[in-house]
Image (spheres, rainbow, N blue to C red):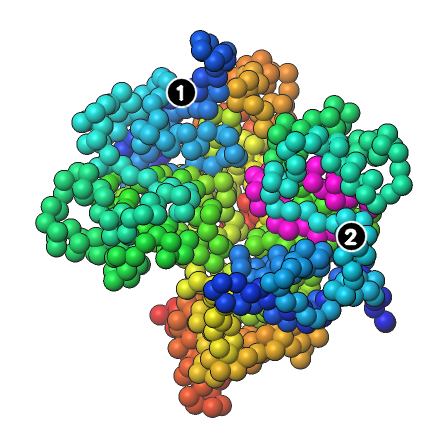
């Protein structure tokens, strides 16, 4: 597992080892038999360094949200270990699990369904204090909540308003305030801006970046938008069908992607510049195969432009391909191929 | 050189809906034109009126609570004055539309093939068997593998990308002259988005249609559109050929959109510059320039005076509705590109307004201040 260690050599906050989550598929009404499993996350290992922003990207159904939910223990892993500050949290229950919640919090994708419409903003943000029995005095709690509202850029006077009185961007700020209320060490943001309008997205992204700097938060940032992930993250893991196919520092991943799937993802991103954006597109054909019945060996071989016989016989290990970039591929992209298909990627690495 | 008369010409279109809360001015004086074989991209946020504009073109906003004025000329006929029956002849035949959410636009109880055939039979005299053959041919055209089997499947058996392809097949069934695609890729992953965009571009070049593509994603229009119109609060605030719009954007809202999205080719350390505030209510619109409450470069006058969409003196194809002078706008944009924060540019602008004749300092002082 030595290759998984981070190049920067910082202190590890989270170590994930061989994490697996299978959701059973059952048949029968009275007597339910398991007839298969959706392999949402299938043997994933990575580390998260204290204070960094770790990104997970991938298409719908690649397992990125399941991974996030496993990390904060909203789901129970099927097997594998999640070490938080050196302790395995994968089997925690009851009181010890509740104590863990003070350390890790989550910001959800949809700011409309993740806030209770019947509660005032003040009581939504105060909820973590109620649950964990902090700031018991009425005035003290209110003052603390208003500090939080001010910090995320909400007007503290709106303490008694209801979520429907706020716009999407402001609601997402409420969600962020609630998540940082307990001053957690880890914040997991699952698609925090994808439900927001373009002009509002930057407000929330800047807020998250600022908070991370001020509070020294460790941030796990999950999104399908590759430009947003690059902007936010220090290191990025690319997932495909429940596996990590490439893991690298942001600049390396976007400047010189090694896995053909990463290359295809980057090549698909529309560039808001009609002149610079011209390139030979590497289009993937077909759809992502079903995670209930993924292809054998390398899971990408059915759609990979570089696939050869060995790709359907032997699973490539996730190992070092180029200066700290981990990729699971038998035939990583060459510099020539990157140049041809991804002029944008090379532009990004220019000083 | 006389340009061929456009296929679709929208003149001063206004659409207002009466609601319990008041009158919503969804579209307010929009004009544009699309010619055969060209692609127009309409960009804007939710609530900017981009969808209502195209729904009105299709005659889908007619109702008791709707007030529509202006002209929508399609091949010289005003669609707004046509009867419902005459419009039905055109809709789905000469003008077709692709909607954002393919799952809710396909009927879950009917087979995909049956829904395709229905579109054909509504406009063509053809036997059911011939319509079914045409449906298979269309599924093949949009790149759905194994169309003979797929034609008898239900929408839930299709993946998201395939449903969108089926929607496109349906829109193309009668070889329309104009295809309106309303956020055709918003619900899709990037890899599928790239497939769908190249499919639309490919079909356009083969069939010679005019295409209107509506999206909030500047990247998508940069990929596919020849001309771009930027909408804000029911109006077009800037329109130009795509290359010129991206090279020399003129409206502060366009700058805001360009500066607020992270870009793959920019440095990671570059701070995003968000547009402050949020889009205005279309019931109580701000006075003066609609963008002034969010515009960093507003001056006192801008709160009273309503700007017109006017061509640039240097480029008649590039139109913008902004009260700043072209020279000042050019200086601010160069400042923004050099990484000067909008506050500094604003300060320089206000300063130059106070001392007439010193306007040139707006751009000159910006970047140098940033360096110190």
Q: Reply above or below: A131 against A201.
A: above
Single out the mark in the foreground, 1 or 2.
2
Quadrant in which residue B113 is drawn = top right
Quadrant in which residue B103 is drawn = top right
Q: In the rendered view, does B218 fall on the left or right side of A3?
A: right
- Residue A118 can be seen, yes or no: yes
Q: How many numbered markers are drawn?
A: 2
Q: Residue at x 32, y 39 (%)?
A: A106
Disc marking residue A20: 1
Q: Reply above or below: A316 against A344.
A: above
Which residues lie in the magenta part?
B165-194
Disc marking residue A351: none
Q: Residue at x 22, y 47 (%)?
A: A126
Mark 1: secondary structure: strand
Q: Position of residue A46 (x, y in %)?
A: 37, 28
Q: Determine if the magenta segment contains residue A127.
A: no
Disc marking residue B88: 2
> Same chain for marks 1 and 2?
no
Q: Nearer the viewer, residue A248 or B180?
A: B180
Q: Nearer the viewer, residue A256 or B134?
A: B134
Mark 2: secondary structure: helix
């Amino acid at each position: 597992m030595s290759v998984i260690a981070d190049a920067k050599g910082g202190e590890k906050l989270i170590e994930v080892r061989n994490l697996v989550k299978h959701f059973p598929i059952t048949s029968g009404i009275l007597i339910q038999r398991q007839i298969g499993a959706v392999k949402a996350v299938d043997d994933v290992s990575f580390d998260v360094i204290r204070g960094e922003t770790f990104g997970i990207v991938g298409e719908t159904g690649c397992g990125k949200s399941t991974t996030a939910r496993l990390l904060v223990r909203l789901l129970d892993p099927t097997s594998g270990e999640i070490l938080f500050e050196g302790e395995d949290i994968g089997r925690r229950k009851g009181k010890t699990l509740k104590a863990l919640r003070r350390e890790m919090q989550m910001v959800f994708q949809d700011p409309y369904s993740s806030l209770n419409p019947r509660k005032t903003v003040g009581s939504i943000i105060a909820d973590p204090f109620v649950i964990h029995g902090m700031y018991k005095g009425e005035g003290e709690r209110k003052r603390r909540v208003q500090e939080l509202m001010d910090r995320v850029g909400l007007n503290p006077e709106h303490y008694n308003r209801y979520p429907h009185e706020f716009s999407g961007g402001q609601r997402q700020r409420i969600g962020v305030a609630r998540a940082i209320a307990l001053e957690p060490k880890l914040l997991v943001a699952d698609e925090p801006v994808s439900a927001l309008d373009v002009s509002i997205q930057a407000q929330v992204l800047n807020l998250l970046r600022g908070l991370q700097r001020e509070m020294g938060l460790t941030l796990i940032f999950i999104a399908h938008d590759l430009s947003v992930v690059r902007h936010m993250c220090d290191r990025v893991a690319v997932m495909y069908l429940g596996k990590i196919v490439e893991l690298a520092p942001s600049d390396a991943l976007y400047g010189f992607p090694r896995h053909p799937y990463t290359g295809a993802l980057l090549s698909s991103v529309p560039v808001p510049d009609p002149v610079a954006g011209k390139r030979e597109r590497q289009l993937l054909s077909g759809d992502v195969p079903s995670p209930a019945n993924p292809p054998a060996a390398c899971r990408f071989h059915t759609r990979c432009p570089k696939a050869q016989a060995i790709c359907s016989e032997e699973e490539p290990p996730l190992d070092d391909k180029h200066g700290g970039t981990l990729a699971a591929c038998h035939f990583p992209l060459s510099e020539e191929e990157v140049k041809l298909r991804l002029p944008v990627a090379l532009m990004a690495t220019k000083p | 050189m006389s340009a061929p008369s456009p296929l679709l010409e929208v003149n001063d279109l206004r659409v207002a809906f009466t609601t319990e809360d008041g009158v919503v001015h969804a579209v307010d004086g929009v004009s544009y034109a699309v010619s055969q074989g060209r692609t127009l991209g309409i960009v804007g946020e939710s609530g900017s009126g981009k969808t209502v504009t195209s729904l009105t073109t299709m005659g889908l906003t007619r109702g008791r609570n709707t007030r529509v004025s202006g002209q929508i000329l399609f091949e010289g006929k005003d669609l707004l004055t046509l009867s419902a029956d005459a419009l039905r002849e055109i809709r789905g035949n000469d003008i077709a539309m692709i909607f954002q959410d393919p799952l809710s636009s396909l009927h879950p109880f009917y087979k995909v093939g049956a829904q395709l055939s229905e579109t054909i039979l509504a406009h063509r005299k053809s036997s059911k068997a011939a319509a079914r053959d045409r449906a298979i041919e269309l599924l093949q055209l949009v790149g759905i593998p194994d169309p003979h089997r797929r034609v008898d499947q239900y929408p839930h058996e299709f993946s998201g990308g395939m449903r969108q392809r089926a929607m496109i097949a349906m829109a193309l069934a009668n070889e329309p002259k104009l295809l309106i695609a309303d956020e055709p890729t918003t619900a899709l992953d990037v890899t599928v988005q790239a497939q769908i965009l190249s499919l639309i571009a490919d079909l356009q070049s083969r069939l010679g249609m005019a295409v209107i593509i509506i999206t909030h994603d500047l990247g998508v229009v940069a990929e596919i559109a020849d001309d771009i119109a930027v909408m804000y609060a029911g109006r077009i605030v800037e329109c130009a050929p795509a290359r010129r719009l991206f090279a020399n954007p003129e409206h502060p809202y366009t700058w805001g959109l360009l500066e607020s999205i992270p870009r793959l080719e920019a440095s990671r350390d570059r701070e995003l510059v968000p547009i402050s505030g949020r889009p205005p209510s279309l019931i109580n619109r701000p006075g003066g320039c609609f963008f002034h409450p969010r515009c960093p470069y507003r001056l006192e006058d801008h709160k009273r005076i309503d700007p017109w969409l006017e061509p640039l003196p240097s480029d008649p194809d590039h139109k913008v509705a902004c009260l700043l002078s072209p020279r000042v706008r050019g200086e601010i944009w160069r400042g923004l590109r050099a990484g000067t924060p909008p506050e500094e540019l604003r300060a320089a602008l206000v300063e130059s307004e106070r001392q007439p004749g010193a306007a040139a300092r707006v751009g000159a002082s910006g970047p140098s201040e940033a360096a110190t």
